[in-house]
């Protein structure tokens, strides 16, 4: 599991083990510090795709005015 300051090898969603903060991070980007514990070691665990909660997509309402 990567720590803060390390480059990400795979795009994905990660959760930190200290506070449960979730982030999306692109491949090649550096893992950040925990927002609640800056300057301390932060371990980021990848979240399995089946555990990611999908948000509903709102469809625009049809315009019924003529």
Image: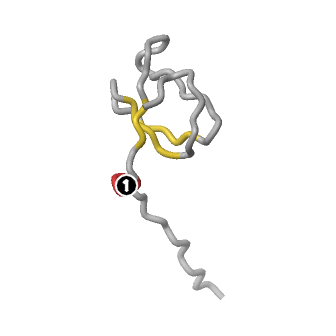
Residue at point 51% right, 46% down?
Answer: 12
Q: x, y (%) of residue 10?
A: 56, 43
Residue 31 sits in quarter: top right
Reading the image, the residue beneath label 1 is: 53
Toward the top, the furthest residue is 39
> Which one is nearer the viewer's eye here, 53 or 58?
53
Whether residue 60 is situated above or below residue 15 in the rendered picture: below
Toward the bottom, the furthest residue is 66
> Which one is nearer the viewer's eye here, 34 or 47?
47
Q: Residues within 10 Å of mark 1 (few under 14, many from 20)?
A: few
Q: x, y (%) of residue 32?
A: 54, 25
* Side of 41 where 5 appears, left or right: right
* Side of 57 where 66 appears, left or right: right
The N terminus sits in image quarter: top left
Look at the numbered disc 1 and give the secondary structure of its residue. Answer: loop
* Side of 36 where 11 appears, left or right: right
Whether residue 28 is situated above or below residue 38 in the rendered picture: below
């Amino acid at each position: 599991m990567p720590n803060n300051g390390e480059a990400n090898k795979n795009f994905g969603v990660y959760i930190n083990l200290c506070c449960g903060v979730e982030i999306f991070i692109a491949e090649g980007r550096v893992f950040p510090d925990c927002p609640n514990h800056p300057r301390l070691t932060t371990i980021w665990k990848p979240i399995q795709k089946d555990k990611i909660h999908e948000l509903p997509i709102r469809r625009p309402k049809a315009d019924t005015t003529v």
